[in-house]
Structure formats: C-alpha cells, structure tokens
C-alpha cells in the first residue's frame, strides 16, 4: 500500500516546527528518521494531514554532558548515540540497549526521539528511560515542559505528549560510577523483543549494592520499573543466592500487571532469568 495524501513541510528551526504542529490542529505528525512512522503511513494506520520533517532542526541534535546530566536531542540518530564517547562515558546503559535496536541500517536512520515517542512496549530506549528516571523535555506554543519518564509512557504507542508538543530531548543522570547491563530475548536476531531488562547498579566500597535501578520491557503496556527487585537488591552482594531472590522479586513485580497476552507467564519467567544474568554481568 501507499500513504494517503498529505502535505509536507520541512522546518529548519524548532520554533517553526512547533508553529507548524500547532497549526495542524491535531492533524499533523512529526517525522525524522521515519523507521516507525513510514510503515504506519504505508499501511494507512496513520493518516496525517501534514507531515512535518524535523530532520534539519539543529536544536534537536544536541548531544552533550551538562554537569551531572547527559542530554540527548530527540533528533540524534540512534547509531550516533550508540557510538558516541560522550554517551558511553556518561551513560553506558544507552549504547548497551541500542545495540538491540533493529539492524544497523535502522539505527543509522532511526532517532532517539522517534523511538521514545513511538512508545512501543517492547522498545529498548523507553525501558532505559524508565529505569534511569529520565526527564523528557517537550516544547509547545505554551513553552517548555519536563515530563518524568514514569509518567510519559501511558500505553502501547501512547504517551503524555499533547498534540501540539514536540519532544526535544532526553535528560539522563550521569552513571560514570555505575555498572550497567541490558539484555533481551527475541524470536530472531534483531527482532522484536519478547522481553528485556535494563539494570544500572552502583556499589559501595565493600562490594554491596548501594542502589539498583531496574526495569523490564515486553511484559505490559509500557516499560515497568522493577521496584520490588530494586529493594531486594539493596545492600546485597549479588551472589547466586542473592540474584535468585532478586529475580523472584522481579517476577512478582510483573505479576502486578494485567497480563501481557497469552504468553504472559512465559514473559515473566524470561524477565526473571534475564535479570539474574544482567546482575551477574554487573557483579563481575
């Protein structure tokens, strides 16, 4: 199939992009890499009256460390973030997760903001954002708004963005003293994840866990913060027995959800197994 008819605009500034989106009165869609939106257009699952291409907007290309925060613009290509020394040093969980995002050709075109705004329940970057308490910044004619990641993802392909808001950047805490791991299982290489886990763990000098930030994808309508597992990990040494206990707590976290399809029980077991492996990685 081919897309339904639409008008095309290519703004060069954020101000112009915001104005175009507001003028569309809910009938406009933003596009940058197009890796999520173009298939929807071709299948006519999305029928915007105007397509606003923000690929030239320089304000969306920021990639910098600001004191204790890493700032990644919504227009930054996934491959750029994956290979960036600034990202690797500031928040290594991001490149660890990005290596699972589709094929290299997809990451060369896909953007950070596109993945976040698409809000696929199995997507890697939303899981990272929830695990790390990321701040997502949106701009509209009313000004700038900061949305906590835990409040941003409302359900499958549904976010807290208003119709006239442009997602401009993601702000993450710098994790230079934190060990990270990201693991997922898919039916085929670079396929859609069945389930996955993000882990960022900071240790005390004696090797015990000072703080664990844990999240799961693929087990619900949105990324899930594994709060019970985080509590179970605190002050532990992440030995085999400890990892089994934390993994069991993670499974309990997922059981609070109203299923994840007919294979919900399987996905929960996968989360427990992956989390145990991720904790073993960060403990070594």
Image (tube, rainbow, N blue to C red):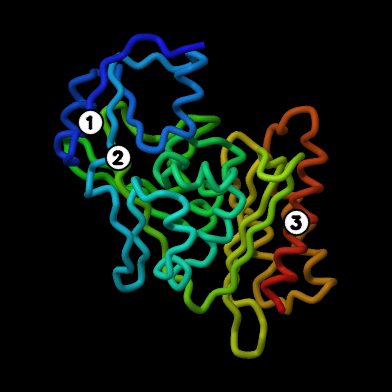
In three-dimensional space, the C-alpha distance between marks 1 and 2, rounded to whole angstroms, equals 8 Å
Q: Foreground: 230 or 274?
A: 274
Q: Position of residue 39 (x, y in %)?
A: 51, 24
In three-dimensional space, the C-alpha distance between marks 1 and 3, rounded to whole angstroms, equals 42 Å
User: Which residue occupies the extreme right position in the image?
Assistant: 241
What residue appears at the point 35 percent right and 32 percent down from the top-left corner?
31
User: Which residue occupies the extreme bottom position in the image?
Assistant: 206
Tell whether 147 sits left or right of 96. left
Q: Quadrant of residue 69?
A: bottom left
What residue appears at the point 82 percent right and 40 percent down from the top-left corner?
266
Q: Which residue is mark 2?
A: 55
Q: Which residue is mark 1?
A: 10
What residue appears at the point 66 percent right and 38 percent down from the top-left corner?
192
- Structural crowding at the residue carrying mark 3, measured as other residues with C-alpha within 10 Å and reported as few (<14), some (14–19) or many (≥20): many
Tell whether 170 sits left or right of 105. left
Considering only order in the chain, which callout, 2 or 3, is on the residue closer to the N terminus?
A: 2
Q: How many marks?
A: 3
Q: Position of residue 233 (x, y in %)?
A: 68, 69
What residue appears at the point 80 percent right and 64 percent down from the top-left corner?
245
Q: Secondary structure at mark 1?
A: loop
Tell whether 237 sits left or right of 212. right
Q: Secondary structure at mark 3?
A: helix
Q: Is residue 92 above or below residue 8?
A: below
Q: Which residue is mark 3?
A: 274
């Amino acid at each position: 199939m081919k897309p339904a008819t639409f008008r095309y605009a290519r703004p060069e500034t954020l101000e112009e992009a915001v104005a175009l989106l507001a003028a569309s009165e809910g009938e406009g869609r933003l596009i940058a890499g197009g890796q999520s939106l173009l298939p929807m257009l071709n299948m006519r699952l999305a029928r915007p009256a105007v397509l606003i291409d923000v690929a030239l907007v320089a304000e969306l290309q920021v990639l910098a460390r600001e004191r204790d925060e890493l700032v990644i613009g919504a227009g930054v290509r996934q491959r750029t973030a994956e290979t960036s020394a600034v990202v690797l040093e500031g928040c290594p969980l991001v490149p660890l997760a990005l290596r699972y995002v589709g094929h290299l050709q997809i990451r060369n075109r896909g953007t950070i903001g596109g993945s976040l705004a698409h809000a696929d329940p199995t997507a890697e970057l939303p899981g990272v954002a929830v695990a790390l308490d990321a701040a997502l910044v949106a701009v509209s004619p009313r000004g700038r708004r900061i949305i906590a990641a835990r409040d941003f993802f409302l359900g499958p392909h549904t976010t807290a963005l208003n119709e006239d808001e442009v997602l401009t950047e993601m702000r993450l805490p710098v994790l230079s003293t934190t060990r990270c791991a990201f693991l997922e299982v898919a039916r085929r290489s670079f396929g859609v994840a069945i389930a996955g886990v993000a882990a960022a763990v900071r240790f005390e000098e004696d090797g015990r866990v000072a703080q664990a930030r844990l999240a799961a994808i693929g087990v619900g309508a949105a990324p899930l913060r594994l709060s019970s597992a985080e509590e179970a990990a605190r002050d532990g040494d992440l030995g085999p027995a400890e990892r089994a206990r934390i993994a069991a707590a993670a499974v309990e976290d997922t059981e609070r959800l109203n299923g994840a399809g007919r294979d919900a029980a399987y996905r929960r077991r996968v989360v427990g197994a992956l989390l145990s492996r991720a904790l073993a990685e960060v403990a070594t």
